[in-house]
Image (cartoon, coloured by chain):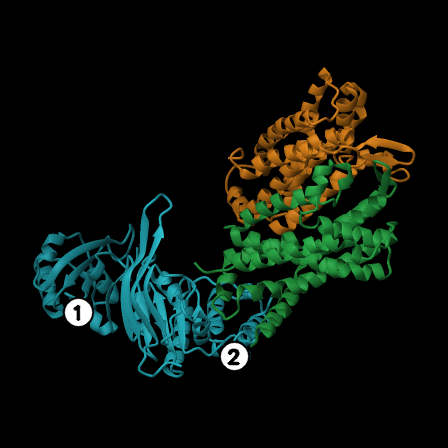
Amino acid sequence: MTVISGTLRLASASTRQLLRSSEAWATTLAFPGALLAMLWLFSELRFEFGSQQVALIDFWVTGLGVLGVALGNGHAFLANISNWKAGGVLKRISLTPITAGQLIVGEVIPRAVLGMITIVAFLAVGNALGADIRMGAELVSVIPVMVIVTFTGLSVAFVIAGITKSPQNANAMDTAVSWPLYLVTGTMFPLAAFPAWLEQIAQFVPYTGLIATVRGVVLESRPLTDFGAELAVGVVWMTGLLLAAGRTYRFVK
Amino acid sequence: MSSTNEPAVEVRDLVKVYPRPGGGTLRALDGISFRVENGEFFGLLGPNGAGKTTALEIIEGIRRPTSGEVRVLGVDPRKDLDRVKRMIGVQLQAASYFSLLTIAEILDLFGSFYPTRRATTELLETVGLLDKADFYVRHLSGGQQRRFSVAAALVNDPQVIFLDEPTTGLDPQMRHSLWEMLRRLNRDEGKTIVLTTHYMEEAELLADRVAIIDLGRIGSIDTPRALIAGLDGQGHIEFTTNRAVDTSELAALDGVTGAATRSNGGGSSLGPDTYQLAITDPNVAVTSLLSWSQGRGIEMRGLEVVPGTLEDVFLQLTGRELRE
Amino acid sequence: MMLRSRGVIAAIITSTLYVAFFGLIEDLEFGIGDESIGFFDFVLPGFAVFLMVYQIQDITVAVGASFKARGILKRLATTPLSPARFIGVQTLTYVGLGVIASGLVLAVGKLVGGYVAMTANLLWLVPLVAMVALTSIALAYVIAGLTPNPQTATNVGSTFSFLMFGFAGVMFPVAALPGVLPDIVPYVVPHAAAIEAIRGIVLNGDAITAYGRQVLIGIVWLAVALTLAPLAYRFTDDR
């Protein structure tokens, strides 16, 4: 068994479990569905800030599409992996030649694929409901951005599961970490409406630049190359968190 | 590859110290040492909290010792854990598996982690679960889950198998069925097995040699027969009577070293109490007891000579009962 | 026990922090047609109530579902305690906390620049917030009772909370909904009518008498929720 083949076997097993999980289906369909229905009903509403304005549906489909929908499984995923740690699955795996890193990547691969499918579907449905989403090559450009987003979010879940002692503590920490992100990354409210110092700090928060990239691409048809700095910050966060995940989510006492 | 003279497992002066929550330390293992030879069935017998699981987890490489040495087939788990993992199979005391994979899929997955492996159908047949191949673990009974855990421990056809209390919580029939399977693995396939248990009968029936462990220390290591033969006494006599008797009279009988009573609870057809006499010589003790009871007009019921057990060995070594 | 709960303490802290954060907004308005509505002033009253209440609701869903899954309810079924009394005792303590926390959040909102009409009518917020909190908690028990396991309960509860933020007028003006929906929503969406009354009192200093219809709708929703809760959250599976 090579490192790659072992990881791919894990990814295959993880995919099978994901497809069999009613929780995963519910969170992939129910919450995004409810969100889209709400945005469609509020399609007349817009944000006005300074001399700019943007339709709520455009703003939230892109913002929450990236953060909320792509990570829609994050909470259930965290419950899963922290239960593995508490319930002995991680301990049992640690007795095999598989490394924590392989387990993590094996879990991340199918969820990243699911995340990408979900965001494309979400943007497409958002477009059908009235959001001004460009549906051409722009959608393809979004995919690498979503890879970074999903790997980042799932790495955070592994870090939280690794450093907390129980699924309950993991859940509490995830809530404490996630909700501020929805606020300071420009997901739900335009950062331009906030003081300039907050806008500047927010550029270094995970996801801020990635959300701005997706908005720029699908709402304004700008090329990915316009967002070099934002993507660089995203890649740095993703890499650091992946490494942290490998170091924290393990079982050796 | 280990040489044939090398033991399967060697543990030397193993110590594990934990900090206590309120301050101070807990010495979970206090310098234990033992060897397990190739092809041997070795038992670690002790009550809950004796340090059995801690010792096993250090040998398996998932827990770090405070000090001491461990070798598995000549390899130090701290220096080459990967190599050790490939050579051993482990059944944990409370293992969990992926809840949305069938047991066949779990064995396939685990098997894929090793360079050599046993076929899934062969493994399931060995543990009698071939007809449950498409079941999730949570849909198996307790005994079946335990057997599945053993199958998972065999997936890489290991040379040494570690079993941590494999029959705890199982009913007698399941326990016997599992014992049979473990005997076959050891006798027919030549697997070295290291088993921890707090069941005296399990250690006596299965193990070639038993280490008695309590409070982090090993009291004695030998074959079950030798350990029992080393007892000061020869077991005990049990009986009930038609009326209460004075245990000091019983303790003074020839061949008897001590007497105790155990209540049978109200309404038992056996009578109110069961008497236990610790004895040195069963012939002398029984003769003396019968003579005494005839002289007192006491009716003896259910007289039984119980030979020495590992439980008696544990009690003698530690001063505590194996079953708390 | 509840006051020692880290979840409750976290709920109070996060609610005040969110409002303080929104106070940083310098220039954001809602636009509906030709109209513009200041964002922070609009959302403050709803947030003051609902930021705390939705967290209490989520905690109740989680705890209620966990009690059910862990067999605690089954154990209670062997005692003289009825589901209604059990729910009632748990609920009253959370309601008191919700009222106090909402007052705290509103005060923080005013401190960071939000508009609050400082009149005696603000005291009517106490029964109104209590009504919203009580309704939410009862609905939480309905969710916990009808879902098969704690994880599903939490997912359903979170989705329900999220929809309330949108449709109950907490975060978005109900007037932005199309067609006849703005007229229907106060009746069919829990809390919507109460939030309308609360907003009017906080922003305009209105008396409670100006919101008789809204209060009545809120009371009806409360009655419905309190009736459904013990029916859904049963101690045993015998139906």
Q: Can you see residue B309?
A: yes
Quadrant where the N terminus of chain A is found in the figure: bottom right
Which chain is assigned cyan?
A: B
Please tell me whether residue A43 is drawn above or below residue A95 in the rendered image. Answer: above
Specify whether C220 is left or right of B45: right
**Kind of residue at badge 2:** Pro
Measured as percent of width and height from the top left, residue C106 is found at 68, 26
Instruction: Say if mark 1 contacts mark 2, CB within 8 Å.
Output: no
Establish whether labels 1 and 2 are both on one chain.
Answer: yes
Residue labelled with disc 2:
B115
Q: Position of residue A32 (x, y in %)?
A: 76, 51
Chain C representation colour: orange
Q: Residue furthest top?
A: C120
Chain A drawing hue: green
The three-letter code of the residue at mark 1 reads Gly
Q: Residue C32 carries which label?
A: none
Is disc 2 placed on a helix, strand or loop? loop
Asked if A201 appears above or below A1 in the picture, the reply is above
Is C162 situated above or below B309?
above
Q: x, y percentage for residue A175?
A: 62, 45
